[in-house]
Amino acid sequence: MSIAELTPSDDDLEAVMHGLGAEARAAFRALTQATTAQKDQALRAAAAAIRANTETILAANAQDIAHGETKGLRASLIDRLMLDEDRLDGIAGGLEAIADLPDPVGMVMDSWTRPNGLEISRVRVPLGVIGIIYESRPNVTADAGGICLKSGNAAILRGGSESIHSSTAIVECMHQGLREAGLPEAAVQLVPTRDRAAVGHLLTMVETVDIIVPRGGKSLIERVQNESRIPVIAHLEGLCHVYVDAAADPDMAREITLNAKMRRTSVCGAAETLLVDRTAAERLLPPIAKALMEAGCELRGDAGSRALVGGMETAQEADWTAEYLDAILAVRLVDGVAGAIEHINTFGSSHTDSIVTSDDTTAERFLAEVDSAIVLHNASTQYADGGEFGMGAEIGISTGRLHARGPVGTEQLTSFKYVVRGTGQVRP
Amino acid sequence: MSIAELTPSDDDLEAVMHGLGAEARAAFRALTQATTAQKDQALRAAAAAIRANTETILAANAQDIAHGETKGLRASLIDRLMLDEDRLDGIAGGLEAIADLPDPVGMVMDSWTRPNGLEISRVRVPLGVIGIIYESRPNVTADAGGICLKSGNAAILRGGSESIHSSTAIVECMHQGLREAGLPEAAVQLVPTRDRAAVGHLLTMVETVDIIVPRGGKSLIERVQNESRIPVIAHLEGLCHVYVDAAADPDMAREITLNAKMRRTSVCGAAETLLVDRTAAERLLPPIAKALMEAGCELRGDAGSRALVGGMETAQEADWTAEYLDAILAVRLVDGVAGAIEHINTFGSSHTDSIVTSDDTTAERFLAEVDSAIVLHNASTQYADGGEFGMGAEIGISTGRLHARGPVGTEQLTSFKYVVRGTGQVRP
């Protein structure tokens, strides 16, 4: 753990970071020759190593927890950081699940033959070296490293500084897996210092890093988007809406809203604002509000909704853009589906939004005109998840429009090339 | 033409540029509701307007030519800038060809049903507002504006300052087309000033511009990549290679090399370096060199190739990275396909590279390991072109790995969204 404790001088840090970059680049070149079997073997062997080294990893985690408690870390953050045998088993199982996914690399996405006989195909290739910046969550170390490896990319992982011992121990298990499969350890590297200046270097290593994936709070994402000289796939925030249309089935509207808000309030797919069609609000809103309040949810309504439901707080303008990640829901009456679309495209974060209605024409308009990565009809926003989409593990949900949108899994971490096979064609 | 002559104060310029951005944003919103028929009508009506206004456009072009000659513009640049009836007819035909392309927007890329009954589909949507920075080529004004419109994007065009009158006249015809189709004129806007500071504003308008597409010389692309706060799809340079393997058919190797270099030397798909397998160079290189020299090509060879062919210049290290865009070719002997791959991945620009060989195993290794947007077997590098790929018009060839790689046409200027249709599903 000596490197982990290093607080290098500025020059040393720059050298350390550029060294990581150069090693990642070389590892990426080696990975482009790796077979699917080799990558899957590395993932399974890493999972086995995590199970075999449970005690070592838990001891490292205890160091992190002790350090976190000394620093006065909040209980919710300590909980995210904490490992136990069950959680470690889940982390190992996650790597095995990634091994079970199809290999995106080499997949022929499309192929066609030109009139001159040229056979053209579009074939998936890895993206390159991916820098991932995330919270103090040791499970993300394994997930992110595993997803990058499966898709043929080299990963430079920068976990939250409070998790450095746990993450180092997990990365050592991944290195064991890579060695067993005959792949370079540098395919998965962890930034070996708590020094926050390391992120600044990572974001400017244009020669060796192809893409940056930040995960975490708004301030981190904004820092990354402002400072990075490297393209960013960002998961901004999940300001998700449920719109209950006049033509909604009342029971379905209640169950979907309750689930979208309260199943888990801390996930990015949790609903933060409920929009209700003004013409039917008197009939539809009270039972929904009752169910939410009984489940312990605070409601913050506009004048129209407060006139229909007692016990609501008054919503301020800021509530329309608040990602509570808590048992709080903003409520607003709108003028039909057009009003809902207008509200969502104005205040939303282009993440995930749902309409509840029995009118298919209204639904199709919502699905077409709401400008979000995921739009749903008669289903909970909490389905915003790569696993629920059948895509396997994900490292985030992109709210940007370039390259990857929505869940970012193994396929989304690939690029492609055009392969053209001829018989001597020259261009006239 | 008064606006075109404007040299606004710094504050005015910023206001002008942000005004363009806001109008483009609003136009983009309107375009998301446009039908295919409307967009195609706008394109065809713009083509008709160009044909109907030939005299006006040629008069505007004459102003640009006169200004360019006063400035002492090189003859090759004057030629690129010059319009005549034939060229204008070609520009109009280009817009009609874009109208004939399939509409990428709304295309279902993929769809599947989950065990819980959720029906998920991935549907193409436009990218948003695209800023295009290009040379003084009036034809690009129509092409780029047309491709953006077809793919549902709003375009802010910044053509080279020497072409401003021609481009303004062409954009006026596009506005006429948009009006006839009931679409907002601001879907295609031209930066109405020669002031170079306008580009600096465009590159930082993160609130209104989604993507920047630079076309042109290396220095422009580098400036854009350094200054832009907006994601860039860049066409860097075309440092294309032909590798002639020991197992190549000699006639095919000669014809492909000759075509790859000399068909047109100024295009990005023109070969700049010829690599020849050392073990067969004595047999294969001399006839290729003879054909090239007879066609007027200067050869710059390494020691090995100069020992086999008289009349070659001596290649310097800089020749391996030179994009000549002229009748000059660097020549080097390499150790088989492995040496060729190593050379290309070290010195190339990830654009387009071709192997000539009758050995399919060798070819597949080259196709897999050369890390370029386009890799070819037994075909000329001059096929690096969206039209030749059957993709229709393109606004460049991306050498980056993110979002778009290779020819950038209408499909590459789209994003997508996930549309999920349920029957009341809530997540357990």
Image: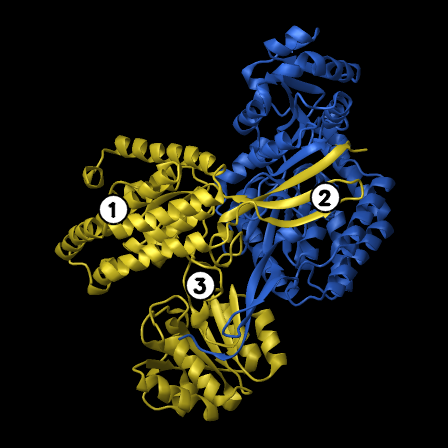
Chain colours: A blue, B yellow
Looking at the image, residue B16 lies above or below residue A173: above
Q: Secondary structure beneath disc 2?
A: loop
Looking at the image, residue B47 lies above or below residue B323: above
Residue B372, how many percent across, how many down?
A: 52, 65
Dot 3 alpha-carbon crowd within 10 angstroms: few under 14, some 14 to 19, many 20 or more? few
Q: Distance between the residues labelled 2 and 1?
A: 49 Å
User: Which comes sooner in the sequence, label 3 or label 1?
Assistant: 1
Work out whether residue B302 or residue A63 is closer to the camera in this orientation and state it.
B302
Residue highlighted by disc 3: B387
Give the mark toward the camera: 3 or 2.
Answer: 3
Residue B270, how many percent across, how many down?
A: 39, 71
Residue highlighted by disc 1: B169
Instruction: Give the quarter of the image for residue B262.
Output: bottom left
Residue highlighted by disc 2: A389
Instruction: Give the quarter of the image for residue B131.
Output: top left
Chain under disc 3: B
The amino acid at mark 2 is Phe
Residue plotted at (44% across, 63% down) = B387
Q: How many labels does the image show?
A: 3
Q: How far apart are marks 3 and 1 (CA)?
A: 26 Å
Work out whether residue B323 or residue A64 is closer to the camera in this orientation and state it.
B323
In the image: residue A89, left or right of residue A184: right
